[in-house]
Image (tube, grey):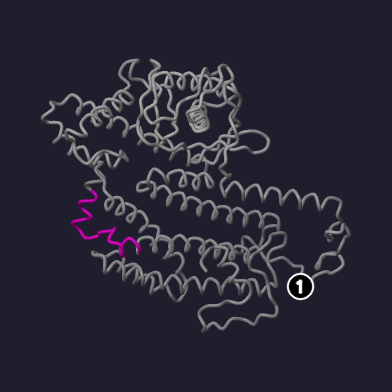
Amino acid sequence: MVNQLAQFSPLDAATYVQQQGEMGRQRGQQNKLAQLASQSYSTPADQQGQLLGQMAAIDPKAAQTQQTQFESTEGRRNKTLANMSNLLVNAPEQARAGLYQQMLPTLKQFGVDAPAAYDATTAPVIDQTARALYTAYSGNGAQGQVQSTYVDAQGNRVAILRNGSTQILGQDAPKVQIIDSGDGFYGINKSTLQGTPVVTGGAPAARGIGSSAQGNTADDKQAAELGREFYDQMIQSGLNDQQAMSAVEVYLSRMTRGSGSAAVSGGGGQQLRSAPAKITPYQQQQLELERERDRDAAAQRGVPSGYQRLPDGSLQAIPGGPADKPTVSEKPMPPGAMKQVFDLQDQLQGSENVMTMTQKHLQRLEAGQLDVRPGAAAEGWMRNKAGLSDANSRNLAEWDADRTEMVNESLRLNKGVQTEGDAARAIKGLMEASDAKSLKQSMARLQAVNQRAIALRQQQIGTLYRNYGRGPDGEPLDVAPRASVPAADPAAGSGAAGGVDDLLSKYGIR
């Protein structure tokens, strides 16, 4: 293959190497997506937005697919709550206490703040809540269909039914926050970090919405009317149904918080005010990067090649520019050497995933969250097949998937170097481990072997760059030639000369 590449034109060879590098980058992204997807099985609901944001930064379509799965899970949760509520309110009174105790673990798993027991004191509250949940989530008839929801001043999620009535569903937090960008209001989705323009303005209201915990019928009807009117405005402004519903939640929540118990003058409505919350650190970072790019672009307009503009407006020659030519060879690296560099960098990128997986499962073994004994493994397999998974069965499924990739990447990393035999022995122990102690020892041994192989690959990269004086033309490299640095001692096993440490930092290995 090297001889064939040598026959290519420089342009064709460079294109081929760039394609190989892109394939390696895509493979790394797919591995990262697979890790995030596997974490979704055990991610709490309040952290799902952060996980979706990480997936969206890699592949927006994959994030949308994962969000659909989360929504499907929420639908099953709502259906289960409706069925349990219907069963409880229709059961004989003498049987409700025992039935409630059986339902209590599931309710707590769903995040429902339920009383610890069903007795004479808590029975009225539990029965009322059960009827409200069944009415909201059953979807049977027009009286029980939810048209929209919002969060009131006490942080309760309130359902607006199609017949105009309302039901308090329990505590919730809005997933969308309205911010004032300076050019208008935007609804920021905390899960996807996507912003949508929000039309603000006064809404007709005969009186303010009370802030008392119980509320009253007139306030509930008024909230429903305001919500429907604001929803129509959002749809007309171009938002889809989900975005419009999110904006309604925030709008009504801020109306109740802003008005308190004071009345609003008739017909005047209430102007939506700027949210006090700041934009997220991620958004602030993106804004700063964009401003910095704009400043750099403006400063370089009209600047000749090889010069830079100083703060006082004068021009200064860039070291290494037209007035200061480099003394290194102008001959680019041969295609064969370029391919070797990219192959080695691809192996280092794969080793990063192996190190991450190894550390994750070692932590679970230390914490007793991963039981690999044959009996536990068989039970976990049956639980996953039956749809009755628990924490250990999910961790076992993730371990089985990661183990295959760990073995493949370790073999690829150690192939052709003096650690190849050590890696094969460590992998054999890894595959034969049947308890936590032996598995931890095998994983630690494989991790040490991989670290030695990484050091050898670093030396190979440094040697290639030093042999040709610099990296490929036209492409910035983290590993740059350094003539003042002596060649590395092969017996040292690590610490390659040149910019190898920079390359390790790039891949997060050091």
| Residue 219 coordinates in the image, percent (x, y) | 44, 21
Q: Quadrant of the N terminus?
A: bottom right
How many residues crowd around disc 1 within 10 Å: few (fewer than 14), some, or many (20 or more)?
Answer: few
| Secondary structure that dominates the magenta span | helix
Q: Is residue 173 left or right of residue 381?
A: right
The image shows residue 68, relative to residue 447, as above or below, that is above
Name the outermost residue toward the left.
Answer: 94
Badge 1 element: loop
Amino acid bearing label 1: Val
For this rendering, which residue is in front, 34 or 341? 34
Q: Which residue is mark 1?
A: 328
Q: Is residue 325 left or right of residue 452?
A: right
The image shows residue 46, relative to residue 370, as above or below, that is above
For this rendering, which residue is in front, 201 or 289? 201
Which segment is the magenta one? 363-381
Q: Is residue 52 left or right of residue 479?
A: left
For this rendering, which residue is in front, 187 or 32? 187
